[in-house]
Amino acid sequence: MGRCVILGGGPIGDYDRARSALRPDDWVVCCDSGLYHVPRLGVRPALVVGDFDSCHRPQTEAEIITLPSVKDDTDTVYAAREALRRGWREFLLLGVTGGRIDHTLANLGLLMALDRAGAHGVIADAYGEMEILSRGTAYVEDRWRWFSLLPVGGPASGVTVTGAKYPLQDARIEPEYPYGVSNEPLPGGRAAISLGEGRLLLVRTDRDWID
């Protein structure tokens, strides 16, 4: 299968950047007011989910799942669960950071849930992108100015970083002392990150603020 793109109702500060992350064959799910991003992104949603407390129920050819207003899942979490149920295993999430901090943190938790389900999710915003690393090796090309490694769900051990300004070898990073912030790939190369146990939030970024 290809990739599922989930559009949340949070701000998208750089639509050009968001459009550049999209693929022609993406399967797009809009979560409630994520519908407001559709015209500027130029996408056609295949599925719309939500309780429609922040936008009107749309007139659309897309499939619509109307959710109750009283529920445990956020609209975004429901959308991800539904996509997993339908067999999607690669995800891009847009419009899920930068608004309410509680929703942003909940969506970081969603990345962890996708990882636990054997799927892979990336959150992209105007500053960069983030993903969970729990297995294998991840890379950061030198087009990114910085990258950070933050342990989630407990300590991360056996962390090894090569090809970076601040290399690590079999290190341990605790949530209480997340010293893996603002590393840099070496010019002309790419940094490689792996770990033995635990999970890391890998954040790639190339700007301090939106112009």
Image (cartoon, helix red, strand yellow):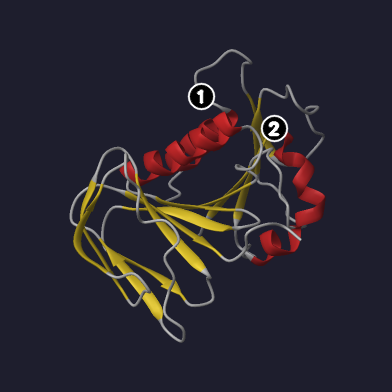
Near mark 2 (Cα within 10 A), the count class, few <14, some 14-19 or many ≥20, is many
In the picture, measured across the screen, residue 127 lies left or right of residue 204, that is right
Near mark 1 (Cα within 10 A), the count class, few <14, some 14-19 or many ≥20, is few
x, y (%) of residue 54? 75, 26
Q: Is residue 109 above or below residue 15?
A: above
Residue toward you, 187 or 103: 187
**Residue holding disc 2:** 32
Image-quadrant location for residue 60: top right
Image-quadrant location for residue 211: bottom right
Q: Is residue 55 above or below residue 90?
A: above
> In this view, which residue lies farthest toward the bottom?
188
Task: Residue at 69% x, 47% y: name it.
Answer: 45
Check residue 194 in the rendering and tell me which mark sits there, or answer none. none
Task: Residue at 32% x, 39% y: name it.
Answer: 176
Task: Residue at 51% x, 24% y: name it.
Answer: 73
At mark 1, the secondary structure is loop
x, y (%) of residue 53? 73, 21
At mark 2, the secondary structure is helix
**Residue holding disc 1:** 73
Task: Residue at 32% x, 48% y: name it.
Answer: 118
Image-quadrant location for residue 192: bottom left
> In this view, which residue lies farthest toward the top?
70
Q: Amino acid at mark 2?
A: Asp
